[in-house]
Amino acid sequence: MWGMRRNFMDMQLFWDIVAIVINIGVWVALGLLIRWFILKLKR
């Protein structure tokens, strides 16, 4: 029972980290896309 609960807590932390990584990845991708779009329009 106690071991199960600790494992669940670890999974919660894992999913929190995954969510943060996905959020950062989305913002980085958006930034690169916008920069590429501006360069394409300028040319």
Image (tube, rainbow, N blue to C red):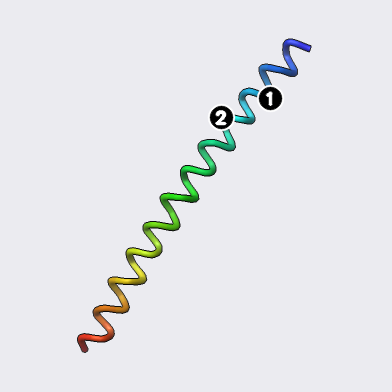
Q: Check the picture and name the quadrant holding the C terminus.
A: bottom left
Give the side of residue 41 with respect to residue 15, left or right: left
Q: Amino acid at mark 1?
A: Phe
Label 1 packing within 10 angstroms: few (<14), some (14-19), many (20+): few
Q: Residue 1 at what x, y percent from top left? A: 79, 12
Residue position for label 1: 8
For residue 15, side relative to residue 25 (left or right)? right
* Identity of the residue drawn at 37% across and 58% down: 28
- Circle 2 sits in a helix, a strand or a loop, which is it? helix
Compare marks 2 and 1 and give the one earlier in the sequence.
1
Residue annotated with mark 2: 13
Residue 19 lies, in percent from the top left, at 53, 44
Task: Report x, y in % for residue 24.
Answer: 41, 50
Task: Find the residue positioned furthest to the top.
Answer: 2
Mark sitting on residue 42: none
> Whole-Å distance between the Cαs marked 2 and 1?
9 Å
